[in-house]
Amino acid sequence: MADWPLRGDGQRFEHHGLDLSTSSGIDLTAGTTKGSWVELIDPTLFDAQFVLVQLGPQGTAGRRHLVDIAVGASGSEQIIIPNLFWDAYDVRQAYHYIFYISIPAGSRIAGRAQLNTSSAIMRVSTLLGSQGFLPSSPLSVVKDYGTDLSNTEGTTVDPGATSNTVGAYVELVDVTERAISQLVLGIGQRSNASLTGAYWLVDFAVGASGSEQIIIPRFRLHAEPSADVIAPLTIGPFPVSIPAASRLAMRAQCSTNNSIDRLFDVIAYGVS
Amino acid sequence: MSWYAVIEDATNRLVSVGTVIASPLPAGLVAELLPSKPSGNVMWDETTRAFIARPPKVLVDRLQDLLANSDFADVWRNLNAARRTKIRNALIWLLGRARWRNQTESSVIDPEV
């Protein structure tokens, strides 16, 4: 895995986008289309090869969000991480996304968001990290797959009508734009406000319909009924080697066959 | 972009949904053209070998659970309509989203294990 650091020495971390008066992140005000950019930090203090984006908690319950992270001067922001999924059925749900991408020192980082209905305030922050001596070659591009921008949601995965039996693959994308070295997943519960207790086994695959090849087998999700949330909400990064122009797909099996409670949705983030 | 359902021909089991179909398909699988990309509001039906509307979720009202509690029912029976309405409104305010539960969920909110 040449893109991963050989050594973990001399690492440095700094957190940006914090509001010390609330011990939380910076507020982003969002509507049903992407809102204005809000500055998280200007400038960054060191060359970073790692970013942790923390979304929530705080916001309005029952809202789904898509968050862009960009670098660049005000008015010329360039998106580096698109459409981070935050399905905040419960405002306590916090999504933490990790990406090993390069952000040069002196950068301005900003965020903006959209949500599925009306408007709300949500919180976001970014924690940057640098590698020590002999850093590996950093990745630089994040691309989202499976995003439904018009409905502010991911691609629905249906485990099917027979419990504990694997369901059909659903396509996230027919052709990836680039080769993918790392994969991160954001999981949503389709605004299901009253989940039954359930467990899932989920496969991530590449390949054409009918000849999918599983590359990440049977990672687990679970739902606890009293909290009505699926966990975990973010998974990865997985080290992968997916060629450009690949079809990405997922399937699952679930312990419940309830036609609503067995569903979840997902957005995959390919890092190149 | 055309969407297809890849189906196990002998059982009508849905194997995959997508726009890129393996050529040739493995033995026993067939691809059927779909009118559009299936949304989360439909689900596969093996009997009809088609996508059908997903039935809505049935939720249980915890106010009904409360009326099934004998102690509460004893008090409730002795209230006039106006007082019942006031108590009902107060309970709706207090319960919030917890008013509606899944059919398999406990009547008790966050029960002790």
Image (cartoon, coloured by chain):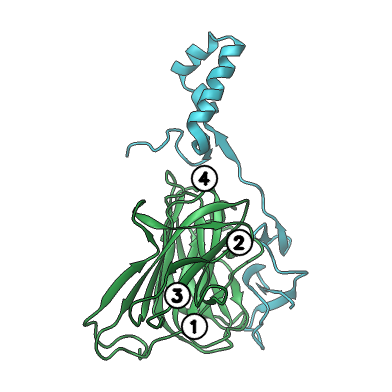
| Quarter that holds the N terminus of chain A | bottom left
Q: Are marks 3 and 2 on the same chain?
A: yes
**Label 2 lies in what chain?**
A
Spatial distance from mark 1 to mark 3, Cα to Cα?
A: 17 Å
Spatial distance from mark 4 to mark 2, Cα to Cα?
A: 20 Å
**Chain A drawn colour:** green
- Mark 1 or mark 2: whose residue is earlier in sequence: 1
Q: Is residue A95 above or below residue A241?
A: above
Tag shown at residue A152: 2
Spatial distance from mark 3 to mark 2, Cα to Cα?
A: 26 Å
- Mark 4 or mark 3: whose residue is earlier in sequence: 3
For the residues carrying marks 1 and 4, which lies nearer the camera in this image? 1
In this image, B44 relative to A45: left or right?
right
Tag 4 residue? A194
**Chain B drawn colour:** cyan
For badge 3, the amino acid type reads: Arg
In the structure shown, which secondary structural element does the residue marked by tag 4 occupy?
A: loop
Q: Are marks 4 and 2 on the same chain?
A: yes
Measured as percent of width and height from the top left, residue A138 is found at 39, 87
- Mark 3 or mark 2: whose residue is earlier in sequence: 3
